[in-house]
Image: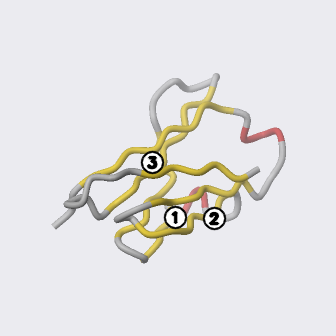
Amino acid sequence: VILKCSHTISSYNTILWYQQSIADTNLKLIGFVFYKNPTVEDQFKEHFEIRGDGEIESSLQLLSGPENSAVYYCAASKTQ
C-alpha cells in the first residue's frame, strides 16, 4: 500500500506522517520528509518507507501486512 500527500504552500518544506491505531488512539509520528531528506522513526523503520519532497509531495509505503491497520495522517509544516 502506498499513501500520497501533497500541498501547495510555497513556504512549507516538511511533510510529516502519523499513525492512529484502533488499540491506541494517540497519534504516533512515523516520520517525515524535510526537503528531499526522509526520516523514519526507529520503531517504524521495518514497516514503512517515506519518499518525496517536503516542498511539494510525499508518499508513505506500508512494507508489512494487516498488523499496520490504522488511520494515517499527513501534515505539512514549515521547519527552520
Q: Residues within 10 Å of mark 3 (few under 14, many from 20)?
A: some
Give percent across and percent down for residue 9.
Answer: 27, 53
Q: Residues within 10 Å of mark 2 (few under 14, many from 20)?
A: some
Residue extending farthest to the bottom is 37
Disc 1 is placed on an element classified as strand
Please name whichever residue, 55 or 42, is drawn nearer the observer in this view of the structure.
55
User: Which residue has dot 3 on it?
Assistant: 29
How many angstroms separate mark 1 from mark 3 (CA)?
Answer: 9 Å
Q: Which residue is drawn at the image coordinates 44% and 69% (left, top)? A: 53
* Quadrant into which the C terminus falls: bottom left
Give percent across and percent down for residue 61.
Answer: 68, 57
User: Which residue has dot 2 on it?
Assistant: 49
Residue 3 as seen in the image, left or right of residue 42: right
Please determine whether, in this image, residue 11 is positioned above or below residue 30: below
Please state the total of marks drawn on the protein image. 3
Please determine whether, in this image, residue 45 is positioned above or below residue 21: below
Q: Which residue is drawn at the image coordinates 39% and 56% (left, top)? A: 15
Upstream in sequence: badge 2 or badge 1? 1
Disc 2 is placed on an element classified as strand
Quarter holding residue 23: top right
User: Which residue has dot 1 on it?
Assistant: 40
Please name the amino acid that badge 2 sits on: Glu
Of discs 2 and 1, which sits in the foreground?
2
Please name the amino acid that badge 1 sits on: Val
Please name the amino acid that badge 3 sits on: Leu
Upstream in sequence: badge 2 or badge 3? 3
Residue 23 as seen in the image, left or right of residue 13: right
Proximity of marks 2 and 1: CB atoms separated by less than 8 Å: yes
Give percent across and percent down for residue 19.
Answer: 54, 39
Q: Residues within 10 Å of mark 1 (few under 14, many from 20)?
A: some
Please name whichever residue, 46 or 39, is drawn nearer the observer in this view of the structure.
39
Q: Which residue is drawn at the image coordinates 73% and 34% (left, top)? A: 69
